[in-house]
Image: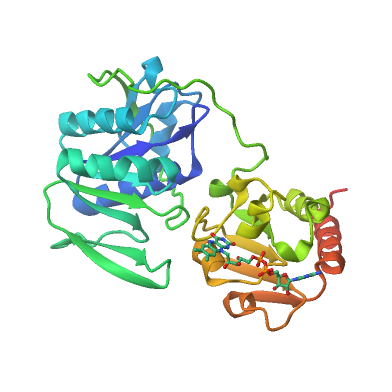
Amino acid sequence: MSVLIFVDTAEGQAKKSSLEALSYGAKIAEQTGTAAEAVVLGAASEDLAALGRFGVKKVHHVTADVFNNFDAQLYTKAIAELATASGADVIVLSHNLNGKAIAPRLSARLKAGLVPGAVSLPETGGAFTVRKNVFSGKAFANVTVNTPIKIVSLNPNAYPVTETGGTAEVVAATVQANEARVKVASVNRASGEVPLTEAEVVVSGGRGLKGPEHWGIVEDLAKVLHAATACSRPVADAHWRPHNEHVGQTGFAIAPNLYIAIGISGAIQHLAGVNRSKVIVVINKDPEAPFFKAADYGIVGDAFEVVPKLTEAIRKLKGVS
Ligand SMILES: Cc1cc2nc3c(=O)[nH]c(=O)nc-3n(C[C@H](O)[C@H](O)[C@H](O)COP(=O)(O)OP(=O)(O)OC[C@H]3O[C@@H](n4cnc5c(N)ncnc54)[C@H](O)[C@@H]3O)c2cc1C
C-alpha cells in the first residue's frame, strides 16, 4: 500500500506543479498511514534523493533514453507497471498538460477511478472523497472514488509546495514498456523566460493594446515582475502573439498567484481560463468592462499611460534599473 506520485520534468528538473503533487501525495500518505513514493521517467539533471524533502521515501527512476521525450502512451504504461509493482493504491499527478494526457489512460489501464483537477486534499476517514472544480471553476464537486486504486490529478497552484525535510532512496527501475510507437523528430521550445503554465505571475494583453507593436509595455512589466506573458484569443488569432500565450476556454487554463489583465474585456470564455488566479488586477479604460467584476484590484485608465508608470514604480520599489 502506498501513494505513487508522477514527477513531470522539464530538461531533467521537476516542474513546480510536480513539487506541488509530491507535497500533496506525501500528505495523503500521512493521512492514510502509508508511504509516499515517486516516479521519474527519463534523464534527471537534479539530485533525485533531494525530492525526499517533500515527504517521499523512495524515488523510482527509469533512465532508459526512450523516456527522454514525453510520450503519453509509453509514460502511461511505465507508471502503470510501477504502480502495480509497488502496490500503489493512490496515484497522484499534476493536472498539467502531460498529466491530463496520462491520467485518463492510466485510469483505463488500471481500471481505477480518476478525479481530474482536484483542488484540495481528499477526505480519507471513510470514503475517499476529493473536491474538484466544475463548470470552468464556477462551482465545486465532491467526488467519491470507490475503486481499489484511486487516481488524482491535482490542479496546478491548488496545493502549496511543502518541504518537510528528509532524503529519498533512489531506485534505478526498469520497465517492460520501452518501445515508443511515435518518434520525436524535433522539439521546438516556446521562447520566454517563464513558462506560462508554471508562472506565479502572469501579465496578459488584449485587443485594447491595438497591435503587436505595442507589446513592449506588457513585456517590460512582465520582466520587472519576473512574470510570463499571456494574451486573449483574438490577439493570438490575429497573430499579434503566439498561440501558446492564449489563455481561456479554448487556450491554457492557468492559476497564477497574480494575473494582470491589460486591455482585456473579460469575456466569459477568457475568464474560464484565468478565474482560478489568486489575485486579479484589471487595467481597462472602460469602467463598465466586465472584467472589473472578477477583479480584486482595478485601474480605470488608458493602458498606454498606466502600464509604463506601473512598471516604473515597481522598478523603483525593487531597486532595479
Ligand atoms: C467558443 C468561443 C471560445 C472562445 N475562447 C476564448 C478564449 O479561450 N480566450 C479568450 O480570450 N477569448 C475567447 N473567446 C473570445 C471572447 O468571447 C472575446 O471575444 C475575447 O476574449 C475578447 O478579447 P479582448 O478582451 O482582448 O478584446 P475586446 O473584447 O475587443 O476588448 C478589448 C478591451 O480593451 C479595452 N481597451 C481598449 N483600449 C484600451 C486602452 N487604451 N487602455 C485600456 N483598455 C483599453 C476595451 O475597453 C475592451 O474592454 C472565445 C469565443 C468563443 C465564441
Closer to the camera in the image, 161 or 43: 43
The residue positioned 43% from the left and 58% from the top of the image is: 158
Q: Against 290, is 220 above or below?
A: above
What is the x, y in percent for residue 203? 68, 57
Say whether residue 196 is left or right of residue 210. Answer: left
Q: Against 320, is 63 above or below?
A: above
Residue reaching furthest bottom?
288
Numbered label tally:
0
Residue 80 is at least partly visible in this image: yes
Task: Find ligand 1 in the image and state its quadrant.
Answer: bottom right
Residue 1 is at least partly visible in this image: no
Closer to the camera in the image, 188 or 163: 188
What is the x, y in percent for residue 261? 67, 65
Q: Against 253, is 21 above or below?
A: above
Res. 302 image quadrant = bottom right
What is the x, y in percent for residue 44? 46, 24
